[in-house]
Amino acid sequence: MDLELSDDQQMLRDNIRTVLTGACPPSLVRAVHEGTSDGAELWHQVVDLGWPALGIREEAGGVGLGFVEVALLAEELGRAAAPGPLLATISQFVPVLEEFDCIDLLAEVAEGRRSGSLAVAEGSSWGLHSISTVAEVTADGARITGRKDAVLAGSQVDSFAVVARDRTSGQLGVYLVERSAATVIPTGALEPTLGLADVVFDGAPAVVLAAAGVEAALERVLQQATTAMTLHIIGACRRVFELTLDYAKIRVQYDRVIGSFQALKHRFADMYLMVEKANALGYFAAVAIAENDPRRAEASHMAKATAGECQRLLVEDGLQLHGGIGYTWENDLHFWLKRAKAGELLCGSSLHHRSQLAAALGLISEVNV
Amino acid sequence: MDLELSDDQQMLRDNIRTVLTGACPPSLVRAVHEGTSDGAELWHQVVDLGWPALGIREEAGGVGLGFVEVALLAEELGRAAAPGPLLATISQFVPVLEEFDCIDLLAEVAEGRRSGSLAVAEGSSWGLHSISTVAEVTADGARITGRKDAVLAGSQVDSFAVVARDRTSGQLGVYLVERSAATVIPTGALEPTLGLADVVFDGAPAVVLAAAGVEAALERVLQQATTAMTLHIIGACRRVFELTLDYAKIRVQYDRVIGSFQALKHRFADMYLMVEKANALGYFAAVAIAENDPRRAEASHMAKATAGECQRLLVEDGLQLHGGIGYTWENDLHFWLKRAKAGELLCGSSLHHRSQLAAALGLISEVNV
Amino acid sequence: MKLRFESSVEEFRQEFLAWLADNRPTAEEMAADPAVSSAHCPEWAKRWTKRLFDAGWLVPGWPPERGGRNAGAHETLVYLEEMSRSGVPRTTNPQGLGIVVPSLLDYGTPDQIERYAMPLLHGEITACLGMSEPDAGSDLANLKTRAVRDGDTFVLNGQKVWTSGANYADFCFLFCRTDPDVPKHKGISIILLPMDTPGVTVRPLNEIVHPQHPDLNEVFLTDVVVPAANLVGKLNDGWAMANGSLAHERGMVWLMSVIDMEMGMQQMLELAPSILEALPEQERAVAADDVVRCYIESHAVRCLGYRGFARLVKGGSAPEQALMKLFASASRQRLARVAAEMRGPDALESKPQRSRRVGTLEDYFGIFGSTISAGSSEIQRNIIAEKVLGLPRG
Amino acid sequence: MKLRFESSVEEFRQEFLAWLADNRPTAEEMAADPAVSSAHCPEWAKRWTKRLFDAGWLVPGWPPERGGRNAGAHETLVYLEEMSRSGVPRTTNPQGLGIVVPSLLDYGTPDQIERYAMPLLHGEITACLGMSEPDAGSDLANLKTRAVRDGDTFVLNGQKVWTSGANYADFCFLFCRTDPDVPKHKGISIILLPMDTPGVTVRPLNEIVHPQHPDLNEVFLTDVVVPAANLVGKLNDGWAMANGSLAHERGMVWLMSVIDMEMGMQQMLELAPSILEALPEQERAVAADDVVRCYIESHAVRCLGYRGFARLVKGGSAPEQALMKLFASASRQRLARVAAEMRGPDALESKPQRSRRVGTLEDYFGIFGSTISAGSSEIQRNIIAEKVLGLPRG
């Protein structure tokens, strides 16, 4: 097992980071937080760079890279606290289209003509259980009625891959709905750059992507969405770590830089360990998914659960060790604090994923999935 | 709410501590650990001092002090890692006899002619559920058949107050069995000074203390046993704290006493907080029991749960900060490490008590009690 | 040890409750014109302060002429308990009432008491506390703001930061350096600075939650001239007075944190059932366990606080308050985190006001002030290790 | 990133497994005469060491004449994986094989290699490592044991402590001070001390669990005379060699801790169902959650270890090993605690042997060696903060 980046992956990562340093500086994130930009320019730039196409098969005009590369991009987007629909598109929408062989739609995404997100969760729970949104098949497609909560980039994407239940058969299926056909209610005001929204469908016209037998494919999609969010959180946490470490090296109190105080040094060691271990598990999940290893479900649960621990420690110690300055709006730190914290609330909490693991290990009876 | 000792309580506590410093030095604890003493001399001394009578009503020849004073004694016994049947007698046996107005037996205890323990738990669970030990009423009393696990001082006491189910009525009752009538299997080899034993009754002759309707009274007894064990753990933890603090003030590494290293100082602050908070909750439970406040059940759950956290931190950091020396048999530290740790396993784990609280708060459905 | 106070104390409680019921401002009054900073005193608050003062309920422990009724420690405790629970703020200028006024009463001249302390007690003016500086956040001894004597005046130059309420306060209780040539803590003095003095510039610092309502400020002082008579106490004696001032603050601050924790816990218990209900059964038990841990902590905060209080009444030492500060702030923060994480994406909602609600990340982030300001948790651990446990300085 | 090794590496694994199946000592053999200290080599272990050496499986990475087969890093990794999982100890003298021998091969004279290293590789003798002293536990630079040159000999005086296996070892790889007049770390040398030399007294230190089988010792040296030829490497060059020696130890030690964690987790998973079954349902979900956390940690230890290994192979730095030491030891300790506490009073049972079983306090207390010895967790945090993160010394 090798969890270090290959040379190609290292190059890709460096390239992404360089681009985002220029295209998504803290000033852009700030502008979106303060409502003076919608971040659209960033989307145009990443489209020009072909990033939405990264994980799309070559046959559909994509780059054809694997999930590890997609996860690396998700991580860097977290590190940049990037706004916009890219994360949802690469880690939720494209995986759905890939699973159901939607070549034409994939081509549209590859060309930057379409962004999308997965509309699955109802209430705060993550997963395929208790979905009550219904699909009614019509002559030319379907009509969707129901409500989806906390859709990632819901107010930013062009379209939704909606998981709904066929009114007649009761089977779960996946349906494409244009954003314009739905009512989008922005939520998540504390972290506006993620574009979270509740989405209400009231007989919205839809294209049928798959009408039945989608469970296994959707589980694979959920694993990708979850693992991308995991790396996204870790990217944000690593940024918090770096900012805090840098600050501790220059901030003077009691005539010493605070980073020379042993109690703080030990906390930095613990924070570093936490980020490294979450990252190692995150990469393990990514490569398990990329290689379609039987452990991919377990690995994605473990990684998201650990990312939860990671954000807990890093947000808390990052803010605490910054002292008052990190508490001010004018300091950039809060972009990553909020991003990391929001990540915990999305794609299933750490508790949710630990609970899934407990069931998988047979320690508790099967959770009602 | 006043959780500080009154002047009388302070005096009692100081007196107990002084006596135990002389009568129960680490050398005695060591002798029991090493099998060269059974600690009987300590029992004779405390009987001479009238300590078993502390919480017994005056009418039965007792001192008639309240449960706070009993809890203080339990705490000091933990602080001394005292061997012998005193803890079980004052915190388990006497409360049973008091609940069921067993004046004659109380008088025997007050005179030092009888020690005893509560035989309630079957398996590792604490509480009154799933008791399968049976009592068969006979002309002159009853006969008990069943097995009780991890009885405190089981190999040291004269008699057991056994909770058993009437074979005919199915009602829970409490029965007195002499130790000589039972088969006592010593357990808990790692902490031999507690005298833990599994006790097997095979038609053992018994005196009926109460044949039915005992649940509420037994709950009150369990609260006392639990809270005494809580303070006992805290006493042991405080001793670990003091030993570790003393050591940190003299142990030199890198040309400084280790207690001057800030990372260690902060850990000492956290340990101190932990002991103080557990102690405050422990005293709250003790006074709630003493005043028969409606919060006594809740308070005893909270206190034992917190003692669990307390022993976790103190055992771990106490041993860790002692370094190698604390790992050696010839250092006394391990007497308290083992005592504190054993306390977690007795009278219900911290998990058990938190779970009871969750049910009491209506957060989860009632636990099957 | 006992659970209940003396009956005379409980009678005192009842007396206050009865008065409170008859005299408290209405919820509507307060909501219509909320206090938006810790030195902002809306009209209703001015009236309320005066009413408290006149009835002897502003600082019950003080003599009647200073707004009190010579109450004892236990009476003051139950008064603060009930005041906190009532939902009515005792003052909208807590540092003014809690630190500045008692310091002035202890060290101020009759004229200073007349011109600054009494109007504050009457709800007419508010004060802020100028301690922290950019390079002396936790480290008062390192402060650099200079006050240079010039005839009958002092000339002030320097910068303060994290000054709560400076954007609304009428005057500042300013710590500044009056002798740069002696060891750090020896050359500090306290000067009363009217905030409308020329040369004073206040820049509010928006916070990471509800940035619309800043309470913290930077204060820039450029050749600010104040009368020499504004010196509080003796020249260069500020360090000792600072310790006195903060002791005033610490005296009963622990109780505020107890009440705050309990009110937070109350909100959590109201919130929890519906959240837990929506979780799958296996997750529910674990989430419930987290709630229970918070519940236990809320009781532990109270028990520890009351234990420390009993020690204080018996003449115990102040450093134990460091334990309460450390514990209460951490517990409340943990509660905020557990509640918000348990709630799911809804915790990201944001309301454009300063009020905190458990179960939101706004509450969680908002709470960090308590582990950072007024001596961070790290400082409290140092204090406990050195002052209480006797460990040597590193 | 990839989950599987090259096929050549997997073939190497299969080759070793096949050999192991044919040549391993039987469980009965081992149980009949267990190794009771870390420098005790029972007869079966002597034969086993020799068999490994002869087949080139003792240290596969070394050349054949030293018991190896010139294996690469990945081959060595899979070899150690399989050896650890087999239940057969690779050696009953890990510090001898892991630290002393490689140091001798690096720095020793041909005669020293002939008389000490090769017999150890052949299973004929064992060695212990004399580093710690009463006032220099973690602080090697502070060691006080003196070696004074006297003609063709050194005369040794001093005391060592925590010397694993000194009660069984044939010789000691002794760190001592040969120049007291230079800064602390500059005057240290390494000397080979046969343990039967007059003036050497070994006092075993019983441990808090299974005190019947001490492994740690105090070693007292009183006017002990050894030939000057027993000096390893250059005089006063011990500090540099120590860092070299410990680097040897650290090279693959991380893998042992991965395997140890996984085997502990395996035991926990075997134990858990019956324990969980006996708990009320609500407690079960919470206890199961604790087990899951351990399960995740066991994977995290592995992933972090393999990530560090990949970096090392690419030329990464050794300090990252500090991260593994810190993490793996803490995780295994947590696992031990969770398992024992979950089990209830039965966890207090005690077996009169050194073997550890998850779910007992014996296992829990026994594991503390790993966070204390070979650089405590506190030392590891210092190393990470200073060497990896670049924070200044305090």
Image: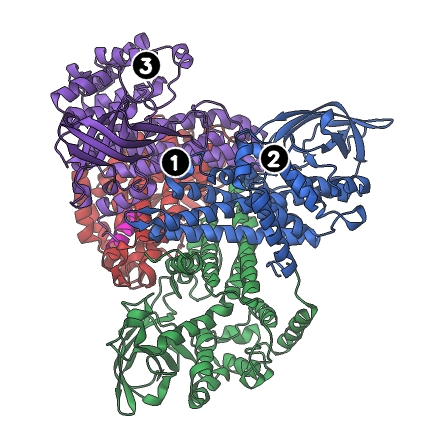
Chain colours: A red, B blue, C green, D purple
Chief secondary structure of the magenta span?
helix
How far apart in space, not on screen, are marks 2 and 1 (Cα)?
Answer: 38 Å
Q: Are marks 3 and 2 in contact (CB under 8 Å)?
A: no
In the image: residue D206, left or right of residue B127: left
Amino acid type at image mark 2: Gly
Q: Is residue C134 visible?
A: yes
Which chain hosts label 2? B
Task: Reply above or below: C193 against D166.
Answer: below
Q: Residue at x 49, y 23 (%)?
A: D351
Q: Is residue C41 visible?
A: no
Looking at the rendered structure, the secondary structure element under dot 1 is helix
Q: How many marks do you count on the picture?
A: 3
Q: Position of residue D227 (x, y in %)?
A: 17, 25
Query: Nearer the viewer's eye, disc 3 or disc 2?
Result: 2
Find residue D45 and name its label: 3
To the question of a shared chain for discs 3 and 1, the answer is yes
Q: Earlier in the sequence, mark 3 or mark 1?
A: 3
**Is D171 within the magenta?**
no
Looking at the rendered structure, the secondary structure element under dot 2 is loop
In the image: residue A158, left or right of residue A184: left
Which chain hosts label 1? D
Pointer 1 residue: D331
- Which quadrant does the N terminus of chain D fall into? top left
Pointer 2 residue: B39
Q: State the residue lying farthest toward the bottom.
A: C152
Q: Position of residue A100 (x, y in %)?
A: 33, 32
The magenta span reads: A233-246
**Is A238 within the magenta?**
yes
Q: Position of residue C384 (x, y in %)?
A: 42, 58
In terms of image quadrants, where is residue D29? top left
